[in-house]
Amino acid sequence: MEERHMAERFVKGLFERVIDYLFPALCIVCDSPRQPRDRFLCEKCHGLLAVNHSRRQACPRCAMNRSLGHCACTHGGDRGWDHPFESAYAILDFDETVQAVMHQMKYRGKKRFAFYCGALLAGMVPPELFASVDVMVAVPLHPARRKKRGYNQSLFFARGIGFSRPGLPVLEGVMARARDTVSQTKLDRVQRLKNMKGAFTVVPGAAESIRGKRILLVDDVITTGATAAAAAQALLKTGCASVRVLSMARD
């Protein structure tokens, strides 16, 4: 009987190796062969993300990579970064690889990939940031956009972070979009702030779950900070103690 099981395992292993040879697992970003044990990214793309992170000299307040130029805090004074949240931390700089990663997260129906990215990148976040907050809240999508996309990528990204940080819960159903804002992509800073003003609200009945809490607000990308600022304002008005922002990338 044991010999039979050994033979079956041998045949199964041989079959899997043949399948891997004929139909290699491909990276979700660059289509290069990846290790079957890694569900999404090849070693090269892993390396590109690691190098991206290692080269960041982030401003502790606005998360801009100071090695790339003046940060939002110093360029034009505080007027360039006058937001209600205490600080922002971005894990990566927005580059071609990160753009491709986010495209898969947001537009290709890859909610498991968004979770994977959260779990993968959580180890790059300074432990003191997690130690200074009580709960995570993801920036919500408007129901119409969430229905079209099928899920909120920032929520799944936050869940992935929570998977790697089991002592830091993700509060869901706390916030909602009060209105469906236009895309921020082609708007300047002033237009973004105007577009996001009053865009978020705390869900009725959820105030007690955040009152007095130090919140880590999670989003996929931060540019001018307008979206995070509007969300933070809604949370602070409801009585949370403080808001800090964590994003996958800084643009």
Image (tube, rainbow, N blue to C red):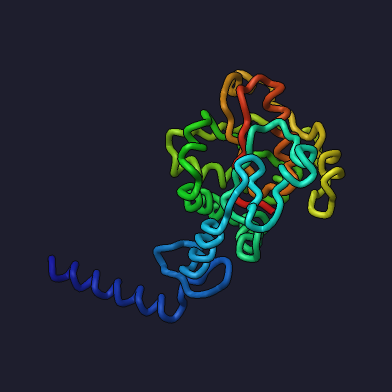
Q: Position of residue 13 (x, y in %)?
A: 29, 72
Q: Position of residue 202 (x, y in %)?
A: 70, 26
Q: Is residue 211 above or below residue 31?
A: above
- Where residue 145 sits: x, y (%)? 74, 46
Question: Is residue 10 something that shows in the picture?
Answer: yes
Q: Residue at x 51, y 57 (%)?
A: 54
- Determine whether 27 is above or below 52 in the image: below
Q: What is the number of callouts on the image?
A: 0
Image quadrant containing the N terminus = bottom left
Q: Between residue 127 and residue 213, name the one nearer to us.
A: 127
Q: State which quadrant residue 28 falls in.
A: bottom right
Image height check: is 249 above or below 30? above
User: Residue at position x 49%, y 50% from top?
Assistant: 124
Q: What residue do we see at 67% from left, 32% from top?
A: 85
* Residue 154 in view here: no
Relative to 144, 166 lies left or right: left
Is 69 situated left or right of 111 in this image?
right
- Residue 116: percent from left, percent from top: 50, 53
Work out which quarter of the rendered image holds the C terminus and state it. bottom right
Residue 53 in which image quadrant: bottom right
The quadrant holding residue 31 is bottom right
Tell which of 208 and 251 is nearer to you. Answer: 251
